[in-house]
Image: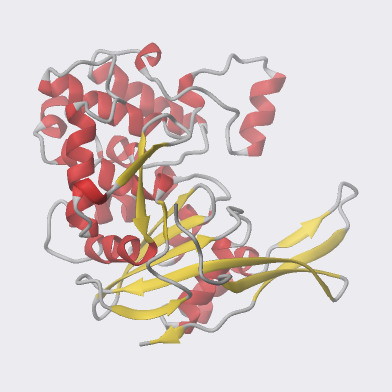
Amino acid sequence: MFKEKCLPEIVAEVIRNERVESRHRGYIAVATTNGSLLASLGEVQFRTYIRSAAKPFQIMPLLTSGAVEHFQFTDKELAVIMASHNSESFHLETVKSILKKIGLTVEHLKCGSHLPLHKPTAKELLIQKERLTALHNNCSGKHSGMLALAVYKKWPLATYLNPEHPVQVEIKETISGFSGVPTDEIHVGVDGCSAPVFFLPVKNMAMMYAELSERNTEPGERVFNLMSANPEMIAGSDRFDTDLMQALAGRAVSKVGAEGVRCLGIRGSAPIGIAIKIDDGSGRASAAVMLEVLAQLDLISEAELDKLSKYRKPVFKNHAGIETGFINVNFKLYFW
């Protein structure tokens, strides 16, 4: 069992009427493709589950298998396979299209269901008394992609989430290749959508996203281009990942993970990866922290920050609509 030697650094504070009400602590790593640290905060060897920030890598065995050409998947279909989507209508229709192309139905998805992440979509679903299905799970695209690989390779379908299933073995090997962590040293848990999820050092997660951002390397460059060209498919309306990729206009890819994980890859003079883990598992500060990291690295302009201002200092309102507080980032990166 991992035991911390000391508390992680404070990265953000919740302010209510000029007083600190709560604090979020976390770990930050900024790395190059070879794993060299450019900047950090806290213990970058801290291990945590990468959660949905693994999705750009989980698609890679599908991309290199021949299945994409065989099923004639579109770029939007490939993008939604990497999504933690809002379950907006265009997300659901795209996942349905994938399932139709591979000859399967929603009943084959083993991710379970939940209300859409997008509140207006969830509200409309409840008003219309529409039945929730696995399509509404934000990971339904990923599961459709895993099934597509299994169908193409003629592997068993019912057990596609088993860690020993060939689909999951290939995914774990991909994670190992990009993270530099040997497969036998990657502890595997069960994600919220029931797929295997990987326990990795924060530094290695940053390196993975740096590698993803490197030009002229496949399948990383293809993933980067798919995400940056189709940001609405990766998350959706009023979501940081989508809005940031649109604001940075093809320079970056961004992917959230549950429990306070957020990763980003950005192309500058050299590819750089950033990984953030909020220690208490809350995601409410992670976008503001990411923007502050980019600002301290001089990787984002004031004009770009202005487009993302609602994420930079998130405001809290009570049920009467009165502003009650905000999140204030409060850290300085250590530069190596």
Q: Is residue 250 left or right of residue 223?
A: right
- Residue 170 image offset from top left, x and y in percent: 17, 37
The picture quadrant where one finds residue 195 is top left
Q: Percent position (x, y) of residue 210?
A: 27, 66
Residue in the image at 38% along x and 19% along y: 109
Give the quadrant of residue 117.
top right
Q: Is residue 206 above or below residue 136?
A: below
Image coordinates for residue 139, horizontal then vertical, percent? 42, 34
Q: Residue at x 88, y 57 (%)?
A: 322
Residue at the location (68% across, 63% down)?
314
**Colour scheme in use:** secondary structure
The number of numbered badges drawn on the structure is 0
Whether residue 73 is visible, yes or no, is: no
**Closest to the observer, 128 or 106:** 106
Q: Image height check: is 74 above or below 316? A: above
Residue 127 shows in the view: yes
Residue at the spot x=54%, y=55% of the render? Answer: 260
Indicate left or right for 284 with 325 as reference: left
Q: Quadrant of the C terminus?
A: bottom left
Q: Is residue 134 left or right of residue 322?
A: left
Q: Position of residue 214 (x, y in %)?
A: 20, 66
Residue 147 lies, with reference to residue 224, above or below; the image says above
